[in-house]
């Protein structure tokens, strides 16, 4: 019951957080005082500006635009409900969509101007989540293993080598690490792989691939014009952005875990356990790891915002069809609906990861107390 109540409260808080950040983003949009119609049609005349704003739904006040968005997300298509609801939503254009694009996606070309882009948002979100989760699992495991090894052999050769390497890793900017991997990978003299890696990665369609392998019923529909074998071959190129994220994040996380483990090994109960004749493996397995695991999991949570920032750099450099890359390309021309919806999805994803982290911490604390 306590766990269920905790999860319910946190879900409500996540909802309030998303709503609050949405209000902040709309406030920035309002303070910018950007007239979309003028920006698009320029000097074509007042009638053309008015028609443009009406087509995009930006002819309403900023407050109405904000509540129209949330009515559309929570309730549905306002126009289709107007008669049943006694015209309560009459005159409000708030279809159940993340928004209508102000600009076409010139980089990806996957949604047209003035069209709802829900499918593209979801597709890019799935791609970003897939990349982040794979990289997170890999670098969390590597960092934990190396941190424990360095702590157990503190001030020895292996510890010194690992600290030097990770110091270099934390000092070099993420964009340089990514650029180096791209250049090494495409250079034939290194005999790794030939070809333009970002161009190959930009052709991948993760969402379509997920639908293909999970839906046999509509297999022929999903595979129409979709070469699965070629996709599987090209999927190996995903190792490069994953490699970049792992190198960038492992160096930072390793040093924290090493410090936590050394601190735990120096506590008095470890010396007491040694005096009672317990071996080092028994002490680590029975006492050190159960005690330190909640702090290690919390450390993972601390790295999540940093990893998401690094993921944005990696997506942009590799031209990966992810949410962060789409937000970067949309910010150039202030395509606010894309920025707004993508920002809210990022907040939801990071908040959900924090909730999962807190649940794991609670579970490990319970196991330790038992």
Image (cartoon, rainbow, N blue to C red):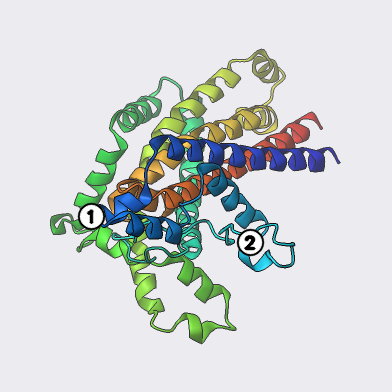
- As measured in the structure, the alpha-carbon distance from the residue carrying label 1 to the one carrying label 2 is 51 Å
Q: Would you name the residue on which mark 2 appears?
A: 78
Q: Residues within 10 Å of mark 1 (few under 14, many from 20)?
A: many
- Which image quarter: residue 311? top left
- Residue at x 65% of width, y 39% of height: 16
- Residue at x 26% of width, y 52% of height: 42
Residue 129 in the image, given as x and y percentages of width and height? 50, 53
Q: Tell me whether the residue at label 1 lies in contact with that at label 2, contact meaning CB atoms closer than 8 angstroms.
A: no
Residue 63 in the image, given as x and y percentages of width and height? 55, 42
Q: Quarter holding the C terminus? A: top right
- Residue at x 31% of width, y 49% of height: 333
Q: Please state which of residues 87 and 351 is positioned toward the viewer in this rendering.
A: 87
Residue 358 in the image, given as x and y percentages of width and height? 67, 36
Q: Please state which of residues 202 and 60 is positioned toward the viewer in this rendering.
A: 60
- Regarding residue 295, the answer to whether it shows in the image is yes
Q: Residue furthest top?
A: 268
User: Upstream in the sequence, badge 1 or badge 2?
Assistant: 2
Which callout, 1 or 2, points to the residue nearer the camera? 2
> Height in image: 11 above or below 286?
below
Disc number at residue 346?
A: none
- Regarding residue 242, the answer to whether it shows in the image is no
Query: Helix, strand or loop at disc 1?
Result: helix
Q: Would you name the residue on which mark 1 appears?
A: 185
């Amino acid at each position: 019951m306590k766990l269920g109540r905790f999860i319910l409260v946190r879900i409500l808080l996540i909802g309030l957080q998303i709503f609050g950040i949405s209000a902040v983003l709309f406030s920035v949009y309002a303070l910018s005082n950007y007239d979309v119609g003028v920006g698009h049609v320029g000097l074509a005349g007042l009638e053309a500006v008015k028609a443009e704003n009406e087509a995009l739904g930006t002819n309403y006040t900023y407050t109405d635009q904000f509540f129209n968005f949330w009515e559309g997300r929570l309730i549905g298509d306002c126009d289709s409900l107007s008669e049943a609801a006694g015209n309560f939503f009459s005159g409000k254009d708030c279809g159940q969509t993340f928004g209508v694009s102000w600009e076409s996606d010139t980089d990806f070309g996957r949604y047209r101007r003035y069209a709802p882009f829900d499918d593209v948002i979801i597709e890019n979100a799935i791609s970003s989540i897939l990349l982040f989760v794979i990289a997170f699992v890999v670098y969390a495991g590597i960092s934990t293993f190396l941190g424990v090894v360095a702590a157990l052999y503190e001030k020895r050769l292996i510890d010194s080598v690992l600290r030097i390497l990770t110091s270099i890793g934390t000092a070099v900017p993420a964009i340089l690490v990514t650029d180096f991997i791209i250049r090494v990978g495409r250079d034939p003299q290194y005999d790794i792989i030939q070809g333009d890696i970002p161009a190959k990665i930009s052709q991948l369609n993760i969402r379509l691939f997920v639908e293909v392998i999970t839906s046999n019923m509509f297999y022929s529909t999903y595979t129409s014009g979709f070469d699965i074998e070629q996709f599987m071959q090209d999927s190996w190129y995903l190792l490069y952005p994953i490699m970049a994220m792992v190198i960038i994040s492992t160096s930072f996380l390793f040093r924290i875990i090493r410090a936590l483990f050394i601190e735990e090994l120096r506590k008095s109960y470890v010396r007491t356990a040694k005096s009672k004749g317990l071996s080092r493996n028994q002490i680590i397995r029975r006492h050190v790891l159960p005690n330190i695991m909640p702090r290690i999991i919390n450390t993972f949570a601390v790295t999540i915002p940093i990893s998401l920032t690094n993921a944005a750099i990696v997506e942009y450099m590799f031209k990966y069809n992810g949410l962060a890359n789409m937000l970067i390309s949309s910010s150039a021309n202030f395509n606010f609906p894309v920025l707004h919806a993508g920002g809210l999805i990022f907040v939801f994803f990071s908040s959900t990861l924090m909730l999962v982290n807190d649940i794991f911490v609670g579970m490990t604390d319970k196991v330790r107390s038992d």
